[in-house]
Structures are given as structure tokens and as C-alpha cells.
Image (cartoon, rainbow, N blue to C red):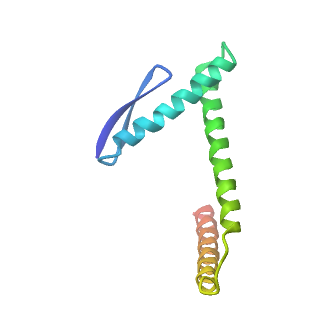
């Protein structure tokens, strides 16, 4: 297990991660840092916590938009007759996974 130091909004955060993931985490911290700085520039005097909250909201909005775009593109992909059985199999697996998730959630609630 590796450890790296992330700096966000002038604070240092020691983070443990899998070996080799240090550079990726540094990159992600840079994205968070930039969004937090953008939030502070747009609303001077904002507290650090609120800046980080807005950074998280900005990033979540970007992820949500990318997911919507990907779903839209995926629905536009033409399926050939050869792809139809595979698509049905994937849909059936997704339904089974969802049922399993629901059962696990119910089991966790009763534990």
C-alpha cells in the first residue's frame, strides 16, 4: 500500500492508496483544487468548506452531464441482428444484479 500527500486549498492530506495510483490521485486533487479556486473567485469570502462543497457540486454536475451524454450516444448506437441476443443477455444480467443489490440492501437493513 502506498501513501501520498494531496494538497487542496492549502491543506495537506495524507492518503493511502494502491501502489501506482499516486499520480492519479494527485491529478484528481488538482481537479478539486481548480474547482474550489473557481468557486472562491466567483464568490469572494466563501469559507473553505463551502468552496469544497461547490467544487464537489461542480464536479458532480460534470459527471452527471457526461453520463447523460454517454447514455444518449449509447441509445443511438444501431444494433445489428447479431447484437440483439448479446443486448438481451446484458439486460438480463443487469436486472439480476439489481435484484441482488436490493436483496443485499434489505439484508443490511435487518442486520
Q: Going 65% across and 30% down the picture, which residue do you hit?
A: 54
Q: Whole-percent x and y of residue 14?
A: 37, 32
Q: Whole-percent x and y of residue 63?
A: 62, 47
Q: Whole-percent x and y of residue 5?
A: 36, 31
Q: Which of 92 and 96 is in front in this view?
A: 92
Residue 53 located left or right of residue 12? right
Q: Which quarter of the figure has residue 105? A: bottom right
Q: Going 54% across and 27% down the picture, which residue do you hit?
A: 34
In this rendering, the answer to whether 21 lies above or below 92 is above
In this rendering, the answer to whether 54 lies above or below 88 is above
Q: Going 60% across and 82% down the picture, which residue do you hit?
A: 83
Q: Which quarter of the figure has residue 60? A: top right
Q: Nearer the viewer, residue 42 or 82?
A: 82
Q: Which quarter of the figure has residue 104? A: bottom right
Q: Going 65% across and 36% down the picture, which residue do you hit?
A: 58
In this rendering, the answer to whether 64 lies above or below 3 is below
Number of residue marks: 0
Amino acid at each position: 500500500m502506498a501513501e501520498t500527500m494531496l494538497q487542496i486549498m492549502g491543506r495537506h492530506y495524507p492518503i493511502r492508496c494502491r501502489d501506482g495510483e499516486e499520480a492519479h490521485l494527485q491529478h484528481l486533487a488538482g481537479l478539486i483544487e481548480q474547482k474550489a479556486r473557481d468557486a472562491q473567485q466567483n464568490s469572494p469570502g466563501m469559507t473553505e468548506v463551502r468552496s469544497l462543497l461547490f467544487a464537489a457540486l461542480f464536479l458532480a454536475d460534470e459527471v452527471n452531464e457526461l453520463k447523460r451524454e454517454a447514455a444518449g450516444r449509447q441509445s443511438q448506437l444501431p444494433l445489428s441482428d447479431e447484437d440483439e441476443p448479446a443486448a438481451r443477455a446484458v439486460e438480463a444480467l443487469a436486472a439480476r444484479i439489481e435484484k441482488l443489490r436490493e436483496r443485499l440492501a434489505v439484508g443490511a437493513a435487518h442486520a
